[in-house]
Image: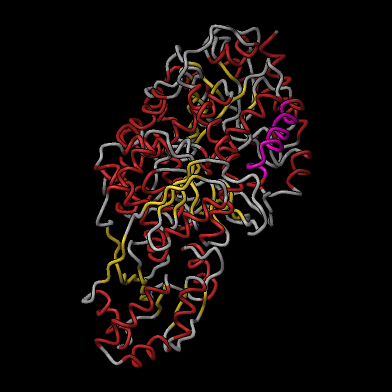
């Protein structure tokens, strides 16, 4: 049986199962591939012990450069006082560097140089290697010993700004760590120690690639980041890279640690289903055996959801097809104007606050049952004509390689922002949706919980808004970093926007496959641009999304801040354009074309006014719509937290009464 201790789920399972005991529900005959060189025989025995059919393949070999000029330069700079802080990422790297230093300078002088400066050990292995040499690290990171823990440690104990920080590399550059250090103002000195090369005989690796492409592998275990880089290179040379990438949608992918997991996503776009805790080979095999069956079933279920968006729409009409909302979306005449409210489940409702008293915002987003509950309570309480899933714009950025944290005081923060054109390469395009399964399940659960007559809206952030978040690192007033990258390197900008657009399209299609009848694209920050820049830098990417979203569901494209963008927004091909309160509804409708449906556009602050004022404002907008088919009443942005619930209820009633008379 499986034993659990403190198990958490992050982009799959982060397991902490005890070893020992019989594993009756292990691999159960599944074919398990492992990329392992040094301990291949031990890996093979472990897989077999846990009931798997092992296929253990060497994927790399270690090569040390005895005349490493970068390392020698670092040693001389250290002993002459030109290095402020050194980060040791591996114990092997520390030992190699010490041996090299001893050949070029006095060994003790080098060790004294380390003692006289700040040193950081990434976990117990480099710390132990340092202590054996007589050097006590200034700090050692906490588990799970990734680049994130290094940056957190420096933020707490050592200001990196204007400091020369040396990073001992191991085989490949850690671009996220370097970006994080540079974002903090550090001068980064990269110190490569050894490199990884392909095995001399590639036959086994080629055979494994073809087995994956042919669907013959159930589970893959990866114990080092470079293994997967070499696997991808061989698959590319064999002409089957796309098939190997696609195989990740069905195989269970398990990594020995988070850094290895990130490398897998970078190289192949695979979602990591399980990260071993602690990061050891035996725990990796045991935890994978414990969870492989259920994880694979989950992956196959998600694959079915995505396949559903490619099927021809059913000819059978569902109750929601004839709803006020869907008819208005299609531009058909309705007996009264439908209404729903952005952020209609939120802090202004006591029921929502009661749920949030026990869970954080992201815990709520990641709990499909709770997310459905808060939305269904809001829909029932308000009497609106559509529901929108409870989620957030930004979780899509995490599987794309961005370190996202929701900070209560300052809002969402990206700890490894994209600032330079070269940084775009570490933004991973989403090839599969396993990491966002909680959103897909939220759609399923909410669709099950809603009355059949009420349509469900899925949503995602638009490319410019997501790009601004990941470039600025959080909220911004002037978008200086975003515009700097956009204006200075259009090729890098378009590459970033294209990766976002394709990822957003897959994300929206997964929501449609899971049960959403309509999807809304939020471009909350695009109002900082003028029409010419919008057409050049943004419109092609929005158009790509609209063109490739499943025909099963229409798209609402909503942007705020600049009414001058309405004409080019309409060129996106979106069925509905959402507008804010900065323009009159009738003027906005003329600009986008009366053949389009329109959504909007009461100022959310008006819900803080007295009921007669709210009713008067609603009447004014309805008068501007003039009874034309295709108007969906909404706010020009989300409900404000200070809004009295009864005012939101009264608005819904007023819209129905005034438009249905």
- Residue 401: x, y in percent? 44, 50
Q: Is residue 535 above or below residue 293?
A: above
Residue in view at x 27 percent, y 76 percent: 71
Q: How many marks?
A: 0
Give how far across and how far down residue 94 sits, in percent.
Answer: 38, 77
Q: Residue at x 64, y 52 (%)?
A: 8
Residue range corresponding to the magenta coloring: 364-379
In this rendering, the answer to whether 386 lies above or below 317 is below
Residue 335 against residue 613 in the figure, above or below: above
Q: Residue at x 54, y 41 (%)?
A: 29
| Observer-nearest of 183 and 331 | 183
Residue 561 appears in the picture as rendered: no
Quadrant where the C terminus is found in the figure: top right
Q: Position of residue 644 (x, y in %)?
A: 75, 36
Q: How is the image coloured?
A: secondary structure
Q: Main secondary structure of the magenta part?
A: helix
216 with respect to 315 (left or right): left
Q: Quadrant of residue 180?
A: bottom left
Magenta span contains residue 366:
yes
| Residue 448 visible, this orientation | yes
Q: From the top left corner, tell me how far across and down residue 508 is, in percent.
A: 49, 30
Viewer-side residue, 210 vs 527: 210
Residue 461 in magenta? Answer: no
């Amino acid at each position: 049986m499986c034993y659990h201790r403190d198990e958490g789920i992050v982009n799959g399972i982060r397991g902490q199962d005890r070893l020992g005991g019989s594993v009756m529900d292990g691999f159960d005959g599944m074919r398990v591939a492992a990329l392992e060189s040094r301990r291949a025989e031990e890996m093979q025995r472990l897989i077999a012990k846990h009931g798997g059919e092992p296929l253990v393949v060497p994927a790399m070999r270690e090569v040390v450069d005895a005349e490493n000029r970068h390392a020698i330069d670092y040693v001389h700079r250290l002993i002459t006082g030109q290095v402020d802080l050194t980060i040791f990422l591996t114990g092997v790297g520390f030992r190699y560097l010490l041996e090299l230093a001893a050949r070029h300078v006095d060994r003790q002088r080098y060790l004294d140089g380390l003692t006289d400066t700040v040193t950081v050990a990434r976990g117990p292995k480099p710390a132990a290697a340092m202590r054996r040499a007589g050097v006590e690290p200034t700090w050692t990171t906490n588990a799970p010993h990734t680049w994130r823990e290094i940056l957190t440690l420096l933020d707490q104990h050592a200001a990196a700004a204007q400091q020369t920080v040396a990073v001992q590399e191991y085989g490949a550059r850690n671009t996220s760590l370097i970006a994080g250090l540079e974002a903090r103002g550090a001068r980064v000195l990269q110190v490569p120690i050894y490199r990884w090369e392909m095995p001399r005989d590639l036959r086994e690796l080629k055979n494994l690639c073809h087995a994956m492409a042919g669907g013959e592998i159930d589970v893959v275990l990866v114990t080092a980041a470079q293994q997967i880089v070499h696997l991808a290179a061989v698959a590319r040379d064999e002409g089957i890279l796309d098939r190997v990438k696609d195989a990740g949608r069905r195989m269970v992918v398990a990594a020995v640690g988070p850094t290895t997991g990130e490398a897998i996503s970078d190289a192949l776009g695979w979602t990591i289903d399980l990260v071993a805790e602690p990061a050891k080979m035996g725990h990796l095999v045991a935890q994978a055996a414990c969870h492989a069956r259920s994880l694979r079933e989950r992956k196959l279920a998600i694959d079915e959801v995505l396949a559903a968006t490619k099927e021809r729409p059913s000819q059978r009409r569902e109750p929601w097809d004839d709803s006020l909302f869907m008819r208005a979306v299609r531009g058909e005449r309705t007996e009264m104007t439908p209404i729903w409210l952005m952020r209609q489940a939120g802090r202004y409702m006591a029921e929502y606050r009661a749920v949030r008293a026990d869970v954080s915002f992201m815990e709520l987003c990641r709990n499909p049952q709770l997310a459905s509950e808060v939305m269904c309570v809001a829909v029932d309480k308000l009497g609106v004509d559509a529901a929108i899933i409870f989620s957030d714009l930004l979780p899509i950025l995490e599987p794309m390689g961005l370190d996202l944290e929701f900070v209560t005081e300052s809002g969402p923060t990206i700890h490894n922002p994209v600032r330079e054109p070269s940084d775009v390469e570490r933004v991973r395009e989403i090839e599969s949706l396993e990491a966002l399964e909680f959103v897909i399940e939220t759609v399923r659960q909410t669709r099950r919980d809603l009355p059949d007559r009420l349509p469900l809206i899925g949503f995602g952030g638009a490319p410019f808004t997501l790009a601004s978040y990941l470039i600025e690192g959080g909220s911004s007033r002037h978008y200086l970093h975003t515009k700097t990258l956009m204006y200075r390197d259009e090729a890098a900008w378009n590459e970033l926007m294209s990766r976002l657009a394709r990822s957003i399209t897959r994300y929206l299609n997964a929501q449609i496959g899971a049960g959403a009848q309509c999807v809304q694209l939020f471009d909350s920050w695009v109002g900082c641009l003028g029409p010419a820049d919008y057409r050049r830098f943004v419109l092609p990417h929005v158009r790509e999304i609209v063109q490739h979203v499943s025909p099963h569901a229409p798209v609402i494209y909503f942007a705020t801040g600049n009414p001058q963008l309405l004409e080019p927004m309409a060129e996106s091909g979106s069925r509905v354009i959402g507008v804010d309160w900065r323009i009159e509804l009738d003027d906005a409708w003329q600009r986008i074309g009366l053949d389009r449906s329109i959504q909007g556009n009461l100022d959310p602050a008006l819900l803080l006014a007295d009921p007669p004022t709210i009713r008067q404002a609603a009447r004014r907008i309805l008068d501007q719509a003039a009874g034309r088919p295709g108007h969906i009443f909404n706010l020009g942005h989300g409900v404000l937290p200070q809004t009295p619930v009864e005012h939101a209820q009264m608005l819904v009633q007023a819209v129905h009464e005034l438009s249905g008379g």
